Image (cartoon, rainbow, N blue to C red):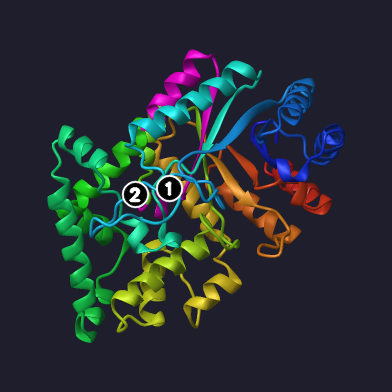
Amino acid sequence: MKNLSVGIQLLEDSLVFGNVEKVFSRVWDLLPFTHVLVSIQNPRLLDACIKEAHEKDVDIYIWKQIFHKIGGEDDAPRQLVGLNLEPIHKSWICPNNKESTESIMEELRLLLNNYDVDGLFIDVFRYPSPYDGLISMLTCFCNSCMTKAEEMGIDLEKTRRGIKGFMEKIQKLYIGEIISLKERFSRPNVFHYLLQNSEILDFLKFRSHSINHFVKNVEQLVKESGRKLGLDVFPPSLSWLVGQDYSILKDNCNWMKPMIYCSGLGPACMPTEIVSLARELQKLNQRLSDEDLIYMISQFLELQLSYKNLNEIETKGLPEELVRLETMRAKEAVEKRIPIYTGIEAVVTDTCSISPRKAESYVKNAIEGGADGIVVSWDIELVPDETLKIIRKALTSSF
């Protein structure tokens, strides 16, 4: 266990001033951790967490959501432009909007100047995901993006037309073509197709470089302050859909936490994201059956799935082995240049109830996949004592 990093995440919702020491002591006694990621606005609470972390010689990172706050304010910026050049009516910030990104950078600068933390941990630095629907996911084509793309030598208008054409092809697939598609469907073939289609490739390249440009600026700010930067990223099988490219992000951070959530429901949780994408494809073409899509998902994940319908993926969750496979893919993508701390679910809530046995399996699969550590996600106050004990046992027995 001493060779592995053990991270915990802590939300302000779980804290009141005066119980911070109790929270830290409870977890520390059950699962000694090496770093804590805190999402806290209250200055007194944040100072108390910093004090407790440093007394235990634990690194503490401020955890910040960047381009979209889950359940964000109604008056948050709405800047994304869709395929039909229509405004997307959701609270998302375009990574190429200079005014907004400069405001974010100033906020991060103030945090680093005012608090004695060891670094920043940034989250939701991406485009919308399948959870938000295809219309939101396939963005952005605003004026800022058009200008940025031109600087990169990419014709974003041509790309936009190419993406629309690709969607029209999906709409027109008939049964015989779907059968043929299934017969040759595989993970390598999907990425081969993307690399051969210039419009799609330019679209993916533009988005990933836009995201990385922002991260690079954050990393420079963090480095100048003598701190470290951690990234909360989608798992490798989904990250390319939201503009997060491990192969270039690895050069602009100190470590990454792939969110390999196989049970939870909501944004970034693999069952929800995968089923959302499948259902969006069915909206385009009702001839795509649940059976067809489950088969193709299985082929892409390179993991045998045996579900009767898409609903079962959400109700039953994805196989625990996926944690091992996605961790391996993350390690390969960063070429072992930076640590990979696999994010595993361990909470008990109304939408995600993880048993101690399942948490243990997630830990073991992460280690088998080559993880340099784990992050117990996503709020340590929602993780039962018994689960913390079994995670510690699983980590200790790995060496």
Q: From which residue to which does the magenta span run? A: 214-241
> Which residue occupies 58% across, 16% down?
113
Q: Is residue 383 above or below residue 339?
A: below
> Which residue occupies 23% across, 42% down?
143
Mark closest to the chain's N terminus, 1 or 2: 2
Q: Which mark, residue 80?
A: 2
4 sits left or right of 178 in the view: right
Quarter of the figure that contains the C terminus: top right
Give the camera-side residue of 311 and 182.
311
Mark 2 secondary-structure assignment: loop
- Which quadrant holds residue 303? bottom left
Give the camera-side residue of 170 and 78.
78
Decide: marks 1, 2 in contact (CB < 8 A)?
Answer: yes
Q: Amino acid at mark 1?
A: Trp
Q: Amino acid at mark 2?
A: Leu
Residue furthest front in the image: 75
Q: Which residue is mark 1?
A: 92
Mark 2, other Cα within 10 Å: few <14 / some 14–19 / many ≥20: many
Say whether residue 74 is magenta.
no
